[in-house]
Image: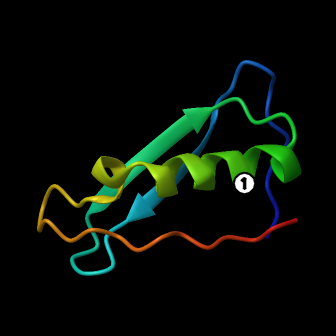
Amino acid sequence: MLERKHHADEPDGLAFYCECCDAKVHEVRIGIEDIVADLPKILDGFNADQQARTCAACGYVQPIAIGPRL
């Protein structure tokens, strides 16, 4: 996958979707400077917050997200 270079004032984002109904469950918009350092922090924050992992559309609680550990 290729991605264009972002400008310093453009936030990046990561969205989590429900495994049951495909609704967006949670979204994080931040300025990512170092994907290797920042992605695990985003995943850890999502995993620690059951409310963020709970789908507003169907009530399903997403399991702990396992992402790449770069």
| Identity of the residue drawn at 32% across and 56% down | 25
| Identity of the residue drawn at 12% across and 61% down | 57
Q: Which residue is mark 1?
A: 40
Identified by mark 1, the residue type is Pro
Foreground residue, 37 or 13? 37
Secondary structure of the residue carrying tag 1 is helix
Residue 23 position (above or below residue 44): below
Name the outermost residue toward the left: 58
Within 10 Å of disc 1 (Cα), the crowding (few <14, some 14-19, many 20+) is some
Foreground residue, 19 or 49? 49
Q: Is residue 35 left or right of residue 41?
A: right
| Identity of the residue drawn at 88% across and 65% down | 70
Quadrant in the picture for the N terminus: bottom right
Q: Is residue 49 left or right of residue 8?
A: left
Residue 30: image location, x then y, percent: 62, 31
Foreground residue, 7 or 47? 47
Total count of labels: 1
Residue 61 position (above or below residue 11): below
Where, by quadrant of the figure, is residue 61 drawn?
A: bottom left
| Identity of the residue drawn at 67% across and 70% down | 67
Q: Is residue 10 left or right of residue 14?
A: right
Residue 9 position (above or below residue 60): above
Residue 40 position (above or below residue 20): above
Residue 48: image location, x then y, percent: 48, 51
Residue 5: image location, x then y, percent: 85, 41
Residue 50: image location, x then y, percent: 33, 54
